[in-house]
Amino acid sequence: MTVATSGEASGSTGRPPSCPVVAEFEHQVHTGPDRPAVILPGGTVDYRELGARADAVARALIDCRGEGTEPVPLMVLDPAWMLAACLGVLKAGKFYVPLNPHHPAARNRELLDRLGAALVVTDAPGVPEPLTDATVLRIADLDARPGTPGPPNAATGPDEWAYALYTSGSTGSPKGILQNRADMRQNVERHAALGIGPHDRVTLINADGFVAAVSNPYMALLNGAALVPYSFQGDGVHDLVERLDEAGVTVYYSFPSFLRQAATVAEGRTASRVRLAYLGGESVHRSDVLAARRLFPAATIAVGLNSTETGLTRLHLIPPDTAVPDPVPVGGPVPGVEVRVETASGRPADVGEAGRIVVRSPYLHGAEWTAEGPRPLAEPVPGAGPGGGPARQEFRTGDRGQLEEAGLLVHLGRADGMVKVRGYRVETIEVESAVSAVTGVAEVAVVPFQAADAETELAAYVVAKDPDLTEAGLRRALAGTLPAHLVPAAVLVVPRLPRTRNGKIDRKALPDPATASSSGTTATATPAAEPTPAPATAAPTAPAPPAAGSGEDSDDRRGQVISQVADIWSDILGAGPVMAGDDFFSLGGTSISALRVVSRIRKEFGVPLKLAVIFETPSLEAVAESVLRGLDDA
């Protein structure tokens, strides 16, 4: 039996959906209801079911709040339900705001207060802390059975807001970026050269299992493809290749830093079904393209330049068996977007001349969420667009670049304080603001640095006014207010910050965080990364712990495992002696070094330890207990 969707029902009332994203998703539900939409390890959600879930969310929102645009925060961890919630909010004529449940409660509480939302959608069975006074709409309470009548389509124009995404802000606090529905849909069109269709299965890789659901998922869902969610913290990268093969993935998308980690532990394994590997969100190096080719020998490599404010602005395809340039261009034009490179004086830069990247398009209506209301991010360009088309907007990105003779754009990094850390956008001023608020801090400077594994990390140089301030105490305070990617990977307590002649902090004169010594209460800086480990064939083989027993034998076995894991931590973190109660991240651990710890434990103990263990139970003793359980289960 064919179930009528809300889109079909609205057609019978003469009120078709006016949101282009909703209309195209409804088309996919109608034409391919049995096609897989989200492929999970425990089962598959097809388009019919995903549509029914979206209808259930929309119906509940309209019942609770009626029609009319307003923000709807989403704190949903289940990836299929998160996608359905995003679509349901759009169907209800409102706009969604993804908030990560893994982030500190204080941060989420601040954002909820700032939004002033009347309703929050969540799949948590209970709220551990009173985050908000808003009504809580729980996923478990919804009637999402396929065939349940859908909600009436809310009257929503394409120029209404679709979502607000909070990123690190240059004012010292998170910045909310709004995008409208027409621009969101046009951003999907810019990816047309990727050729994504119903035959494809596309990765949805997230650092901590939380789906932001802003643009990449719609490249799949609006083209009838299936999404394959994968959690970095929950699943790690050791089993990635097997997961790609098991799910039949044909299109791989991730940040380059995640790909590098996957390539490090692949040990020759490949995913031969992947036809396209798309790298974006960070600078892509020639070595990244070569690593992608090792993992995906049949794939074309795609490199894109995009931002939260503009969406995709350039795209470059590198077919298999073609030369890989160095540096790797971010590509040529995409539909509906003009990219200019301008010098400091405002004139167009010559070929090969570096300058600021400026984007012009009729689809740049994004705004920043402020207390006074939405503030436009782009400025109108006088006159009509090329060929008499719609008027264009202009946005100055803060990126630097240069154009090659062939018209390809080379990205040369940022010209301001924004950097990318593990795929996340970070404004160093926001981190400085959080560090300054910690009791005992007199002054602070936060700068990015290149760790030994070529990843970008943050270093904080702190002048203490409290002699009892320690690195560990500072990290604990920051962990209560900042997401993990904003907590500096290296902390140095210094007697003073170097200054230029005009009194500004001389950031170039700050010591190297990977080698410098603190002269305050912290003995040494804790760098984010460590020397690259030896190849697997050269890795030392540690003696196996004694067999499980009771009494003294059991205590000896436990002590040996703790000691061996402590040696691994000490070696990788460069942290000196490690005690049983020490916290991995307080010692300067990051997602990169956590991956290396897990790799060493897997090799030395032969247990399939998951990366999630370190994130969920980061003490040395707790990790050692997980190793012991793995040995007992072997």
Image: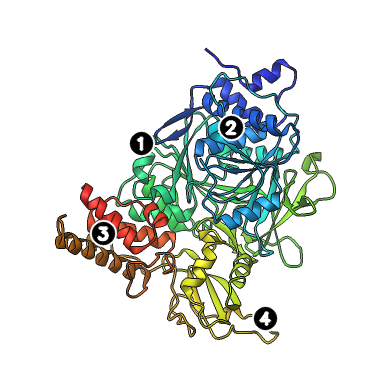
Residue at the spot of label 4: 504
Tell me which label, 1 or 4, sits earlier in the chain. 1
Q: Residue at x 49, y 72 (%)?
A: 473
SS at mark 1 in the image: helix
SS at mark 2 in the image: loop
Q: Nearer the viewer, residue 471 or 601?
A: 471
Task: Give residue 13's position: percent from left, percent from top.
Answer: 73, 17
Residue at the spot of label 1: 246
In the picture, residue 615 is in which quadrant?
Answer: bottom left
Q: Are marks 2 and 3 in contact (CB under 8 Å)?
A: no
Task: Give residue 479's position: percent from left, percent from top.
Answer: 52, 63
In the picture, residue 134 is in which quadrant?
Answer: top right
Which dot marks residue 222? 2
* Above/below status of 472 relative to 254: below
Task: Give residue 187's position: percent from left, percent from top.
Answer: 64, 41
Q: CA distance from mark 2 to mark 3?
A: 43 Å
Q: CA distance from mark 1 to mark 4?
A: 55 Å
Q: Nearer the viewer, residue 317 or 551?
A: 551
Residue 448 visible somewhere in the drawing: yes
Q: Are marks 3 and 4 in contact (CB under 8 Å)?
A: no
Q: Residues within 10 Å of mark 4 (few under 14, many from 20)?
A: few
Tell me the kind of residue under disc 4. Lys
Tell me the kind of residue under disc 2. Leu
Tell me which label, 3 or 4, sits earlier in the chain. 4
Residue at the spot of label 3: 536
